[in-house]
Image (cartoon, helix red, strand yellow):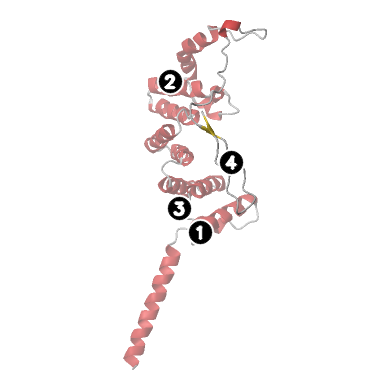
Amino acid sequence: MKRTLLIAAVIATAACTITHYKKSDHPYANPFYMQWVNSNSGLDVQIRNTVGALRISPNSAPLHNQLGQLLVAKGFPKDAEREFERAVNADPHFYQAWYNLGLIRQAREDYSGASRAFLRTVRLAKGHAEALFQLGLIEEKRGNSDAAIDYYAKALRHNPQILDVRVNPRVLDSRLMQLALLKNYELDHARASSRFLGTPPDYVQPPEAQEKAPSPQPTPQQIVTPAAPVTDPGRQATPPKTTT
């Protein structure tokens, strides 16, 4: 009897240990950064709410991406990078998380990883000017001026505001933007010098060019005149008249 009770106690203890391990093994059971997320500030409240939502929906790419952005603002870039990676693992087509992943990798000088993330962004979102610009910065950092100028030129064609320091402060980090502008000059000049004419406001279409809409014609089929309704149950309806 004592032996049976001892075995039962061991099994119960093991079960409790396994259950506790599984609960603590959940990535959002007690994240490391939650020790510093204990104020009532808007940022901390958002982090707590997002972590709570991820406990319910751990495969939500938008939630992972949102938590990554919040953790960057809180000062936890490594945890933020992990969240962006979880976002693209949950949905490989979520290009916003690929772009954010590229930014966080670029910030820690992982240029190969950042380049892969930005290239994936461009493949998913054609003409993503910000990702093209970041690829240009990486190639310029590597000393590949021609590749950098190509990326800058493409970015400028898709979004000229890339040159505005208020929109894109990192434009000041490049010394090749003037060359990218020169690369686009021939195309831009051709577009600007081509004065295409529109339709004048007093234009009147000539009579011979006006097409009359064909009037609808009945198809050559029998037209059936419906029979009169039967009001007397004992009386039969008059057979329908058929004309051609």
Q: Decide which of tag 3 and tag 4 comes sooner along the chain.
A: 3
Looking at the rendered structure, the secondary structure element under dot 3 is: loop
Q: Check disc 1: other Cα within 10 Å, few if <14, some if 14-19, many if 20+.
A: few
Q: Are marks 3 and 2 in contact (CB under 8 Å)?
A: no
Extreme-bottom residue of the structure: 1
Residue type at tag 2: Ile
Q: Which residue is mark 2?
A: 149
| Foreground disc of the pair 2, 1 | 1
Q: Give the tally of numbered discs.
A: 4
* Neighbours of disc 2 within 10 Å: few (<14), some (14-19), many (20+): many
N-terminal-most mark, 3 or 2: 3
User: Can you tell which quarter of the image residue 6 is in?
Assistant: bottom left
* Circles 3, 4 touching at the beta carbon (< 8 Å): no
Marks 1,3: beta carbons within 8 A: no
Front residue of 122/218: it is 218
Which residue is disc 1 drawn over?
56
Residues at circles 4 and 1 in contact by the CB criterion of under 8 Å: no
For the residue marked with disc 3, what is the amino acid?
Answer: Asn
Element class at badge 4: loop
Give the percent coordinates (x, y) of residue 180: 46, 18
What is the quadrant of the N terminus in the image? bottom left
For this orientation, the residue located farthest to the left is 3
Measured in 3D between alpha carbons, the distance from the residue under mark 1 to the one under mark 3, in whole angstroms, is: 9 Å
- The residue that mark 4 highlights is 227
Q: Which residue is mark 3?
A: 59
Residue type at mark 1: give it.
Answer: Ile
Q: Secondary structure at mark 2?
A: helix
Q: How far across and down, in percent of the image, does residue 39 sit?
A: 63, 56
Q: Nearer the viewer, residue 170 or 162?
A: 162
